[in-house]
Image: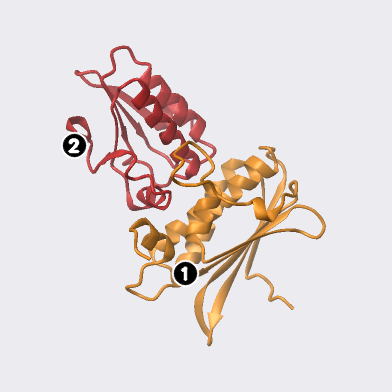
Amino acid sequence: MEERPHIRIELVSDPIYLSGARELVGSVARRLGFDDRQCSKIVLAVDEALCNVIRHGYDRATDKPIWVEIWPLRTGGEISGMRLRIEDEAKQVDPSRMRGRELSDIKPGGLGVHIIREVMDEVVYERRPERGMRLTMLKKLTAPGRKDKATAAAEGVS
Amino acid sequence: MTGEEWISVEQTGDNAVVLAPSADIDMSRSPEFRAAIQEAFRTRGVTRVVIDLDGVGYMDSSGLATLVEAMRTSKSQSTPMVLCGMNERVRAIFEIARLHQFFTITDTRDAAMST
């Protein structure tokens, strides 16, 4: 059985609450051991995921539910990262279509899913059994001195 | 906060327009940010648009999309656009989207005025 989330919040799909969700995720990530740069990227990924739910899932309706859940990851008793889950009751889409656009195609919009996949170590979109979508993201702590995935990609390091 | 309160607009003697937002730019604020930028490009005789991001603590992809659109306007009407004053958090999104090379970015407003 899945461990209960350590944090679970429900917010309505109004963009004015995005800042509160960002504050929560950022402060938890920091407490779990991520450095400032990693925290910024985790916050960005979660923000993009919430924006996608509001913009595309709910067509900007501001009164629909969104749930955010957080678990710490543990390896040998030590915290090794965090897992986040975002669920909604929005229209369901084929998870295989949740891909970001090519970065070489420079145009406004369409960056959210790319950012999420770039920042997080694991990203799984799925339909919820009843209705809506579920996004589960996993971010591992990187050892001191090692670059995380997004930083390495931005610097052209493989 | 309305756009007038969180985006200051200044026109210099040589007709550069400097926009200085002072709030997080996310989905809730991007439309006002976009309107202010497009207004700057419509200023009569504008020679350059500088966007000073020193007061922006956070920007998401909607803010980035707004700037991509602005850069396209800049190129189409041959009016240079320069970004300056980015903190680490804002710079991160440019790097993740690999768009930092698409923009002209300087550290300070003074440098942006002379680039």
Chain B tint in image: red
Tell me which chain the residue with mark 1 is part of.
A
Residue B8 visible within the image: yes
Q: Residue B31 at what x, y percent from top left?
A: 51, 30
In the image, taking residue B78 as reference, residue B60 lies left or right, namely: right
Q: Residue B74 at what x, y percent from top left?
A: 35, 26
Above or below for A135 versus B64: below
In the image, taking residue B32 as reference, residue A96 lies left or right, namely: right
Are discs 1 and 2 less than 8 Å apart at CB? no
Q: Nearer the viewer, mark 1 or mark 2?
A: 2
- Please name the amino acid that badge 2 sits on: Ala
**Local SS, label 1:** helix
Q: Quadrant of residue A153?
A: bottom left
Chain A tint in image: orange
**What residue is pinned by disc 2?**
B111
Tell me which chain the residue with mark 2 is part of.
B
In the image, taking residue B46 as reference, residue A91 lies left or right, namely: right
Seen from the viewer's position, the closer of residues A28 and A49 is: A49
**What residue is pinned by disc 1?**
A31
**Local SS, label 2:** helix
Q: Residue A13 at what x, y percent from top left?
A: 66, 44
Q: Residue furthest right?
A: A130
